[in-house]
Image (cartoon, rainbow, N blue to C red):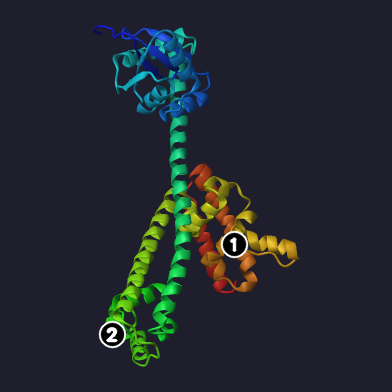
């Protein structure tokens, strides 16, 4: 094994506990985990993230008291945490002879330490801990993706406010030059695109407008309005500044489209059943409003039905007026395309299906989305036929 290095000790994390092993493969210090697979899995997971668990602290402090000042870890996160807390010299080695020796003899060591009575029991324990750690890793990964859903929904919300405000400002500004255009183009994105690309109203030719996506009839109507416009003449420098704002708005509208596509992909990844039934964008907004998929899944369907209508509900309770029948789920075609008199019933049915989908995503992973969506589509078709 070579000449021992003075003051050097290897910290080895295993299924049994945390060990301090010297160059000769001898265990100098140890701290065993409680004989509970859940606690073992939790400790190993926390240590992988660089958290100083009770076992690590006990072993390191006792080794320092015995004069060891150089610690070798297989985990960079753990090495950094120990170095910061105790100011000792640390290094990281992915593989060490000491660690390999301990793991190779783990069965004998587990019996010697009284952790298990037979080697087969260690295999069973190892399997259970591995399954728990895998589940925990999947859960943390999904939680991180859910956080991305939440942040993306927030950004889209702020972006919508900014786009509406700036689009209104663009209409007012460019309206000084061509006021009739605001009446002819309701869509903010199309308005910004036309102003950005064309500029002065004397350049509003039908061909140029159709190239920008306007239907031929609308393009000709806009062109006629431009020729007869009562708007004020504008200097080129003024028009250039307006076009610059319009160009930035076009870029923001494109960014919003890309962000909505990303949000759809996130929702389908984290909650495939919910995304199938609600549509990915509505699914993401429901998760964000509820505070996560798990919270959404644990809600009664009646609460899910009113998510997003909290202000209306409080107002109804205060004034004694009729309570709302739906919140965010009004965006779903199953609700907003229903006749007004049946929207309450439609909202209740949709909320029930969404609750089942969310629970399947959060707890079982069973692929129920297509079946639930088919049941909704069938109900919509019957409603159209008046059944």
Residue beneath the point at 36% across and 62% down: 255
> Which is nearer the eye, 44 or 189?
189
Residue 276 is situated, as x and y percent measured from the top left of the image, at 46, 56
In the displayed structure image, the side of residue 316 where residue 114 appears, left or right:
left
Residue 363 is situated, as x and y percent measured from the top left of the image, at 53, 42
Mark 1 or mark 2, earlier in chain: 2
* Residue bearing the label numbered 2: 203
**Can see residue 213?**
no
Give residue 50's quadrant in the image: top left
Q: CA distance from mark 1 to mark 2?
A: 45 Å
Badge 1 element: loop
Q: Looking at this rendering, what residue extends furthest in the bottom direction?
A: 228
User: Tag on residue 327?
Assistant: 1
Residue beneath the point at 43% across and 72% down: 167
Residue beneath the point at 30% across and 75% down: 240
Q: Quadrant of the C terminus?
A: bottom right
Q: Is residue 208 above or below residue 24?
A: below
Residue 85 is situated, as x and y percent measured from the top left of the image, at 44, 23
Q: Quadrant of the N terminus?
A: top left
The answer to whether the residue labelled 1 contacts the one labelled 2, judged by CB atoms less than 8 Å apart, is no
């Amino acid at each position: 094994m070579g000449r021992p290095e003075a003051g050097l000790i290897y910290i080895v994390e295993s299924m049994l506990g945390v060990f301090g092993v010297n160059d000769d493969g001898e265990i100098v210090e140890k701290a065993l985990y409680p004989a509970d697979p859940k606690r073992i899995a939790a400790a190993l997971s926390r240590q992988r993230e660089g958290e100083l668990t009770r076992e690590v602290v006990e072993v390191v402090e006792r080794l320092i008291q015995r004069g060891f000042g150089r610690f070798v870890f297989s985990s960079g996160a753990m090495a950094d945490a120990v170095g910061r807390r105790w100011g000792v010299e640390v290094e990281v080695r992915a593989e060490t002879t000491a660690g390999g020796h301990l793991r190779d003899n783990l069965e004998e060591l587990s019996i010697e330490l009284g952790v298990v009575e037979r080697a087969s029991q260690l295999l069973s324990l190892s399997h259970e801990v591995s399954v728990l750690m895998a589940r925990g890793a999947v859960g943390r990964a999904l939680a991180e993706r859910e956080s991305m859903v939440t942040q993306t929904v927030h950004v889209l919300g702020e972006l919508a406010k900014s786009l509406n405000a700036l689009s209104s400002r663009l209409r007012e500004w460019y309206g000084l030059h061509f006021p009739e255009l605001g009446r002819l183009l309701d869509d903010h994105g199309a308005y910004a695109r036309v102003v950005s690309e064309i500029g002065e109203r004397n350049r509003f030719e039908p061909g140029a407008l159709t190239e920008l996506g306007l239907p031929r009839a609308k393009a000709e109507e806009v062109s006629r309005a431009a020729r007869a416009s009562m708007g004020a003449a504008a200097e080129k420098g003024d028009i250039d500044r307006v076009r610059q704002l319009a160009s930035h708005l076009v870029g923001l509208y494109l960014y919003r489209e890309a962000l909505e596509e990303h949000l759809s992909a996130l929702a389908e990844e984290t909650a495939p059943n919910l995304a199938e039934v609600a549509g990915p964008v509505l699914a993401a907004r429901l998760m964000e409003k509820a505070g996560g998929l798990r919270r959404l899944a644990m809600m009664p369907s009646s609460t899910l039905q009113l998510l997003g209508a909290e202000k209306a509900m409080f107002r109804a309770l205060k004034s004694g007026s009729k309570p709302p029948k739906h919140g965010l789920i009004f965006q779903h075609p199953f609700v907003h395309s229903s006749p007004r008199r049946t929207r309450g019933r439609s909202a209740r049915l949709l909320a029930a299906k969404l609750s089942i989908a969310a629970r399947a995503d959060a707890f079982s992973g069973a692929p129920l989305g297509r079946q639930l969506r088919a049941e909704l589509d069938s109900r919509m078709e019957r409603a159209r036929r008046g059944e």
